[in-house]
Image (spheres, rainbow, N blue to C red):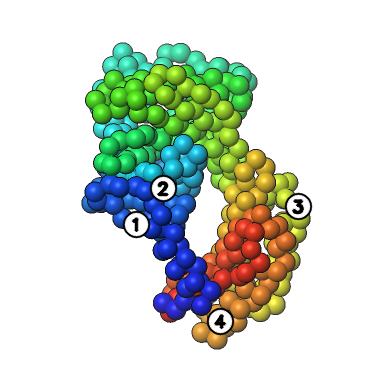
Amino acid sequence: MHWRKTSLCILMSLLVLCGCSTVSNSNQLDPIGEEEYAAIQPYESSDARIKHAALIGDTEARFRMEQGLMDLSKTYFSPTKVAYKTQEFLDYDELDATDGSRGLLGTNRDENPNGLNPSPDEGFNTGNGTVSGAVILVDLYELDWYADDELQGISIAMVVNDALEDENGKTVEITKSRMQNYLEVTSGHLVSYMRERFNSITSNVPIYVACFSLDNASDTLGSYIYQGYFEGAQGDFSELDLTWVEVPGSAFSEADSDMAAQFAEYQNELSHVLVDYSYLVGKATLQDGKVIQLNITLTAHGKTASEILAITQAASEQMVVFTNSSCTYKVEVITDAGTYAIVSKEAGSEDVNVMTMQ
């Protein structure tokens, strides 16, 4: 792997900043940046990972959900004060409902009193009509925060459907007010269950719950829409607006028409370098309706080394077309052999950094 000088300087700066962390767990890796969490070692993967993959097949979507939960958690649990474990409590058996015992993702019924989905015998009022057998809660992601090897808090992502299918096969959207009501009630039940079920989750351990909606819109990749912070049994709730969208796409254009036009210009300029078997697609992160991150994938098939070098140089040079200085940009150049280069520009900076991999 070959690093450009600018990238090396950035890495060295990050390593220096990592030394400022005040976390003091006995077995902890060093974070890769001052704003990132450290993992506790030995790292123990939960069997809940199997359940996550079975429920949502899109690997990128699962990554977004967990990374988004980490980012949102920084408001409540500082990366300089805690490190993390994952799914320490909500393992496969806790989530699964197939055995008819206490599966949290199952429906609430006599055989499964802790199920968090509505009872199959009761209709769910979506605000646009009542749907029987509604499956609203799809999955639960959990991050556990430690300092001095003591549990300091828990973050949970509730993954929900924003629309249901009625008995006639018609899609029925859940209104905002009905969704918020469901989330407040259900997150309260979940927090109470975890405090009663696990001795280490005392009333002194705060629990943050963020709700991720699997948006029904075709070019929207999901949104964090609501959050609750529980100290003891009491929750403090508020709305969220953190959304991922396809680029190009109507949701992206509506959010920032100027950046959408700039992406089209960027795409056009790069097409002059390699016109065949190459394409650009992207994903944007929107916070409160504003684009805060644009990730672009430039895929080039069947190219020579000199051609790939040329397209990477063009990808770097043409970053000048993007004028939103509050946004972070990243372009990944992919060949048949894998990732060749990463071109990036941080928010608030005019410097374009290139990392090549050989």
Local packing at callout 2 (Cα closer than 10 Å; few below 14, some 14-19, many 20+) is many
Q: Against 2, is 159 above or below? A: above
Residue at 64%, 55% (x, y): give it: 327
Whether residue 50 is visible: no
Q: Residues within 10 Å of mark 1 (few under 14, many from 20)?
A: some
Task: Identify the disc placed on residue 309.
Answer: 4
Q: Which residue is mark 3?
A: 257
Q: Position of residue 68 (x, y in %)?
A: 49, 44
Residue type at tag 1:
Asp
Query: x, y (%) of residue 321?
Result: 72, 66
Q: Residue at horizontal 58%, vertical 76%?
A: 312
Label 2 and label 4: CA atoms lie apart by 39 Å
The amino acid at mark 3 is Ser
Q: CA distance from mark 4 to mark 3?
A: 31 Å
Q: Secondary structure at mark 1?
A: loop
Q: Give amino acid for label 2.
A: Thr
Q: Residue at x 50, y 39 (%)?
A: 75
Foreground label between 4 and 1: 1
In the image shown, does 280 or 13 lie closer to the viewer?
Answer: 13
Residue in view at x 49 percent, y 72 percent: 9
Residue farthest along the bottom direction in this orientation? 306
The answer, for residue 257, to whether it is visible in the render is yes
* Residue indicated by mark 1: 30
